[in-house]
Image (cartoon, coloured by chain):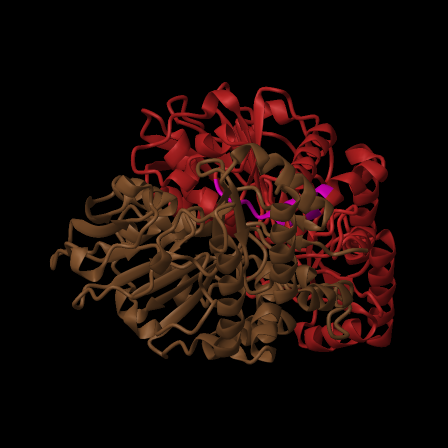
Chain colours: A red, B brown
C-alpha cells in the first residue's frame, strides 16, 4: 500500500487519517453492529452522527444561529437552478459575476428562470483576473448577487468579498470552503459540493440565512425547495448518509488541526511555495494575475508545451498524480486542498526544479 | 466486532463480503494509491469502475440495449417531480395507482405538474391489498402509468405487472429491484433509490427506454433532465462516485450468488419462513392480504400491542435490531433485502417462537 500525492481538482484527496478511521469503523460503528452506511437515517446512532457533523461544521466556520445548514444531494450544479427558484421571490432579475467556467454554468442555468444581469465579466482576458469592487455594476433591484469566489478550472480566487449594499450575496464556494476563516454573515447563502474540502462526492452543503427561506417559485420541485429541507433537518428524504458521516470525520479532523486559522496558515504556505517555483524562472508560467491566484487550484504551464507529456509521465513515476490541466485550459493544474499534505507540495516543488534542470 | 442482523427498511444491510472488500480497498484501490472516493470521476481508474458497474447491472437485470441506465443523485423523491417534467411531453395527464405511502408521495408531487388520474386506490382498506388488473381504470390518453410495485411501509407487493396497452409503465422499484428477475421490456422506466438492494444512500438508478428521452418541459432544471444525464453517461456533473463504486461491488456479489434467479429462490424461502411463523398462531398477525405480501418488507403485529416494547427490547438483546414498524403503521417490520442472510431470518423466526412461548 503506497498512498500517492493526488492533485485532482475533485473528487480529491481526503486526509489519510480520516480514511483510516473510516476503514476501522467500516464493519461496526462504535459497537452498533452496523456500518454507518447501513444505518437508518432516523435511528439514534445515525442521528447522533448527523447532529455532531452539523455542530462541528457550525463550530469550525462560526456559522451564526440565523443560518440553516443543509446536507443535500445533487451537487453545486443542482443549486444553479435551485438558487433562482428559491430566491427570486417577487423580483425578476439577479446579478451575476462572470469570472470563469463555473460562473458561466451558473449563469446559463439562471437565464432559464430570470433576467440575468452580468455585472462583471473577465472573459475578455480568458478569466485570468478578478474584477475590482469599483468595476461591479450592481443593481439595487436584483434579487441577489451570485459569484464564484474560487474558480476551480481557471485557478482564480477573489481577494475580497464583494459589498452588495444589502442585496443577498450568494457564493459557490465548492473549491474554497474551509480553506480559511470567512465571515459567513456577509453572505445570504454559501453552497459547496463536498468533493474538494468536505468529503466524498454526492453531498452538497448549503448554508442559508433563514429569512431567505420560504419564497420558492410555484414550479420548484419539492426536493429543490430549501425550506423543505430546512424544516426537516435535511431528512425530508433519505440523505447521502455515508458522505455526511465522512464529512463529519473531516470536520473533526479540521478541529484537530487547530481549526481554520491553522489550516489557513498551512494553505497559504503551500500555495506560496508552489507559486514561488512557478515564478522563479521562465521555464514555468502562471496565467493568473498575482492578486487573483487561488490557494486551492494552481494552474501552470511549461514554456515549451511539447514537454507537457514528459512532465506528467515523470511526475506520475514520482507518485505525483492527476496534474494534467483541464481540457479547456491545457497545461498543468495542481489542486492543493486541505487534505494535500505540505509534504506533497514540497515533493511537487522539488520535482519541478529537477525536471527543469533535466531539460537544461 | 459483532455484526448484527439489521432489519432496517433503508438504509439497510449490505452484504458483509461487500463491506469487507470495500474496507480492504479503502486506502488504495488496485495499486492506484487512491481511495475510490478520492478519484477524479473522469480519470481512467474511476471510469473503469463506473463502466463495469453499469455493465454488471445490465447483465444481472438483462436490460435491453434500447434502455439507458443512469446513476443519479436525489433519491426516488426527486424522481417524483422529474417524471412528469420529463415524460408528459404534449400530454396533460398521467395515471397513478395509489397503493401506499410512497404512491401518495409520488401522486402529491405529480399533481403540481399535471392532471393526475387515480386509476386504483386501496386507501379504503388501509393499503393492505393489491388492485387487480380488472380494477384499473386506465386512460388511453395518459402520458404514462405510474405505480409502486412494492410499498416499503405497508409491505404490499404486486404479484403481477400491470398491462397498460402501450402507455409507458413507470415503476418505483426502490424496495424490490434486484430481488428477483423482472422483464424490463414491460416498463417505460424503472427507478430505485439505492439504499435497499443496491448500495449506500445517495445514489438513484434510473432505467429508461430511450424513446422517452428528449421531451422535458421547458422549466425542467437541467439536473432533472434525464436526457442531460443520458447524453453524458451520468457524468454531466460529478456523480456520487463512492456510492456508484459500492453499487458495483453489490452487482458483482449478485453475480457470485448465481444471479437474480438464485437470489429469488433464497428471497422466497426467507419470506415464506417469516410469514409461516406469523400465520402459525394468533399471537402474531399480518395486516396484508396473502396475494399482496412483500418478499422484502414484512410488517407484523402482536395481538397484544402492550408487548411490542418487550418484544423489541428482547430482540435487540439477541442481535436482531431495527424491527420497529413505521410510525404510520405501528407494530413491527422486518425488512429482509438481498443482503439479509437466511441465517438472520432463521434467527428472527426462532426468536419469535421463543418470545411467544415465554408469554404463554
Question: Does residue A349 appear in the picture of this structure?
Answer: yes
* Magenta segment boundaries in residue numbering: A237-248
In front of the other: A179 or B96: B96
A46 horizontally vs B147: left or right: right
In the image, is residue A297 above or below residue B126? Answer: below
Residue for point 35% across, 26% down: A89
Q: Indicate yes or no whether the magenta region holds residue A94.
A: no
Count of marks, rendered view = 0
B243 horizontally vs B192: left or right: right
Residue for point 82% across, 57% down: A277
Question: Does residue A293 appear in the picture of this structure?
Answer: no
Q: Position of residue A14 (x, y in %)?
A: 74, 53
Residue for point 38% across, 72% down: B182
B212 horizontally vs B193: left or right: left
In front of the other: B215 or A10: B215
Where residue A251 sits, quadrant-wise, is top right
In the image, is residue A222 above or below residue A302? Answer: above
Q: Position of residue B324 (x, y in %)?
A: 56, 42
Amino acid at each position: 500500500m503506497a498512498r500517492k500525492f493526488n492533485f485532482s481538482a475533485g473528487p480529491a484527496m481526503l486526509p489519510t487519517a480520516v480514511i483510516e478511521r473510516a476503514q476501522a469503523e467500516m464493519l461496526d460503528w462504535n459497537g452498533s453492529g452496523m456500518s454507518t452506511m447501513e444505518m437508518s437515517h432516523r435511528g439514534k446512532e445515525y442521528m447522533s452522527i448527523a447532529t455532531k457533523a452539523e455542530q462541528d461544521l457550525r463550530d469550525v466556520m462560526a456559522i451564526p444561529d440565523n443560518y440553516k445548514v443543509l446536507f443535500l444531494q445533487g451537487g453545486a450544479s443542482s443549486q444553479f437552478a435551485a438558487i433562482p427558484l428559491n430566491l427570486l421571490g417577487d423580483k425578476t432579475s439577479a446579478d451575476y459575476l462572470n469570472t470563469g467556467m463555473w460562473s458561466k454554468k451558473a449563469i446559463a442555468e439562471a437565464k432559464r428562470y430570470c433576467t440575468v444581469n452580468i455585472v462583471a465579466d473577465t472573459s475578455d482576458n480568458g478569466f485570468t483576473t478578478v474584477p475590482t469592487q469599483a468595476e461591479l455594476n450592481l443593481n439595487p433591484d436584483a434579487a441577489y448577487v451570485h459569484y464564484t469566489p474560487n474558480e476551480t478550472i481557471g485557478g482564480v480566487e477573489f481577494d475580497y468579498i464583494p459589498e452588495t449594499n444589502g442585496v443577498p450575496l450568494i457564493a459557490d464556494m465548492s473549491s474554497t470552503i474551509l480553506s480559511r476563516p470567512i465571515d459567513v454573515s456577509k453572505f445570504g447563502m454559501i453552497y459547496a459540493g463536498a468533493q474538494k474540502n468536505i468529503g466524498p462526492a454526492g453531498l452538497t452543503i448549503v448554508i442559508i440565512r433563514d429569512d431567505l427561506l420560504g419564497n420558492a417559485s410555484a414550479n420548484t420541485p419539492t426536493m429543490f425547495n430549501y425550506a423543505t429541507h430546512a424544516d426537516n433537518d435535511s431528512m425530508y428524504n433519505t440523505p447521502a448518509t455515508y458522505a455526511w458521516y465522512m464529512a463529519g470525520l473531516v470536520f473533526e479532523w479540521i478541529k484537530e488541526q487547530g481549526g481554520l486559522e491553522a489550516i489557513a496558515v498551512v494553505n497559504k504556505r503551500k500555495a506560496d511555495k508552489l507559486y514561488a517555483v512557478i515564478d522563479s524562472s521562465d521555464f514555468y508560467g502562471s496565467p493568473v494575475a498575482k492578486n487573483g491566484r487561488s490557494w486551492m487550484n494552481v494552474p501552470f504551464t511549461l514554456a515549451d508545451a511539447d514537454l507537457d507529456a514528459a512532465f506528467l509521465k515523470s511526475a506520475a513515476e514520482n507518485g505525483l498524480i492527476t496534474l494534467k490541466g483541464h481540457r479547456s485550459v491545457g497545461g498543468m493544474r495542481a489542486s492543493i486542498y486541505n487534505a494535500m499534505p505540505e509534504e506533497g507540495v514540497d515533493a511537487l516543488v522539488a520535482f519541478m526544479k529537477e525536471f527543469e534542470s533535466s531539460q537544461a
